Amino acid sequence: MKIENVELVRWFDFPSLGDDRGSLVALEGSKTIPFDIKRVYYIFGTRSDVSRGFHAHKALKQIAICITGQCKMLLDNGIEKQEVWLNSPTRGLYIDDMIWREMHEFSSDCVLLVLASEHYCESDYIRDYKVFSKLKGLPYEA
Ligand code: T46
């Protein structure tokens, strides 16, 4: 069994460069963000009764920032699960490779910005929890 020795939930707090006109957050690859940013995507207009994700990535690392509204993110390393709210434009949640993720309870105004370490690659996705458990060296419990 692979021993996990990194924290499942790792937050990155970004300085808000605000002045009397409003706020600004600047994100730079390999500086504020711990990898070179190869791709940016954002999720919006998700209905509150819809859940997303339900997969892990073999190699991809990401930072998810809810720049407006909120949603819940469940992270699962195969042994431990943790659910957190994403609800701040100055806080990013680091999602490591080989972590199962699910997103739930999107608010109607939720815009989830995701910074990714790799270009889009469908073969990097593990969409079957059984396969995920097996690759982690864990027994599968339905
Ligand atoms: C993740 C969570 C947080 C692309 O063509 N290019 C892209 O870069 C992405 C991210 C998606 N797509 C296509 C693939 C699907 O046809 O867009 C469609 C929706 O993607 P998906 O069903 O994978 O969306 P989510 O919300 O379940 O998962 C996404 C990311 O795919 C995933 O990497 O970690 O957000």
Image (spheres, rainbow, N blue to C red):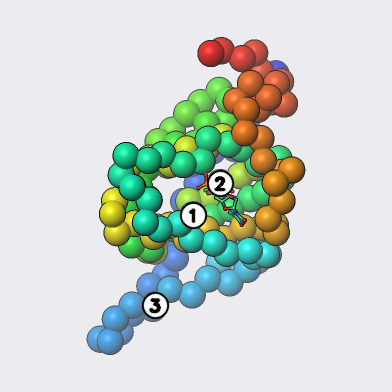
Relative to 107, say whether 28 is above or below: below
Q: Are marks 3 and 2 in contact (CB under 8 Å)?
A: no
Nearest the eye: 52 or 137:
52
Image x and y of residue 107, in percent: 29, 51
Q: Amino acid at mark 3?
A: Leu
Q: Residue at x 67, y 49 (%)?
A: 60
Ligand 1 has an atom within 8 Å of the beta carbon of the residue at disc 1? yes
Label of residue 24 in the image: 3
Three-letter amino acid code at disc 2? Ile
Report the Cα–Cα distance between label 3 and label 2: 23 Å
Asked if residue 51 shows in the view, the reply is yes
| Residue type of the residue flagged with mark 1 | Ala
Question: Which residue sits at x=40%, y=58%?
Answer: 44
Q: Is residue 62 left or right of residue 111?
A: right
N-terminal-most mark, 3 or 1: 3
Residue 14: x, y in percent?
A: 44, 65
Pointer 1 or 2: first along the chain: 1
Helix, strand or loop at label 1? It is strand
The picture places residue 90, in percent across and down from the top left corner, at 39, 64
| Alpha-carbon span between mark 3 and mark 1 | 17 Å
| Residue 5 quadrant | top right
Residue 64: mark in rendering? 1
Query: What residue is drawn where x is 55% and y is 23%?
Result: 79
